Amino acid sequence: MKIAVVGCNGFGKVHLNVLQRVKGIEYYVFSREETKAKECMKEFNANGYFTDYDKILQSDVDVIDLLVSHDMHYTMGVQALRSGKHLMVEKPIAKSVEEGEKLIKTAKEMNKKF
């Protein structure tokens, strides 16, 4: 399994600390700033890094672990699901109940775990 952790701060670091201990997976980090992405990759012994979200969507990553501000969960989450990725997000899952329901509906339509 390949996981892309989108967000190298806050809970992203919490998730990366755990992923370091899981055997048999590959995990990658994302930051828009290349220097930060490289630092995060080295700090958490990740398999690689991304600086462009579209590149993650086009990659062979199985799961996107979205650790960004909740106001971005809907937009980035729908993109992830529609690109064929499974999706994890922290709470709140979206800005509104409607957005949350649309994320759930998209996951079901795409037959992806959310």
Image (cartoon, rainbow, N blue to C red):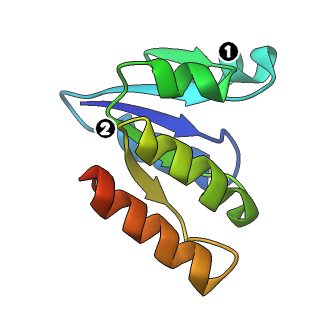
Give the left or right position of residue 25, taking residue 42 as reference: left
Tell which tag, 1 or 2, sits nearer the viewer: 1
* Mark 1, other Cα within 10 Å: few <14 / some 14–19 / many ≥20: some
Give the left or right position of residue 46, taking residue 12 as reference: left
Residue appearing at x 31%, y 58% in the figure: 109
Q: Which of 27 and 113 is in front in this view?
A: 113
15 versus 58 height, above or below? below
Label 1: which secondary element = helix
Q: Which of marks 1 and 2 is nearer the N terminus?
A: 2
Q: Residue furthest bottom?
A: 97
Label 2: which secondary element = loop
CA separation, marks 1 and 2?
A: 20 Å
Q: Where is residue 90 in the image (x, y as percent from the top left)?
A: 53, 65
Q: Which residue is under mark 1? A: 38
Give the left or right position of residue 101, taking residue 105 as reference: right
Residue appearing at x 67%, y 15% in the figure: 38
The answer to whether residue 20 is seen in the rendering is: yes
Q: Position of residue 27 (x, y in %)?
A: 40, 27
Q: Nearer the viewer, residue 107 or 12?
A: 107
Count of numbered tags? 2
Q: Nearer the viewer, residue 46 or 99?
A: 99
* Mark 2, other Cα within 10 Å: few <14 / some 14–19 / many ≥20: few
Q: Are marks 1 and 2 in contact (CB under 8 Å)?
A: no
Q: Which residue is under mark 2? A: 21
Q: Where is residue 82 in the image (x, y as percent from the top left)?
A: 44, 43
74 versus 16 height, above or below? below
Q: In which quarter of the image is the N terminus?
A: top left
Q: Where is residue 74 in the image (x, y as percent from the top left)?
A: 61, 60
Q: Quadrant of the C terminus?
A: bottom left
27 versus 66 height, above or below? above
Residue 54 lies in what quarter of the image?
top right
112 versus 48 height, above or below? below
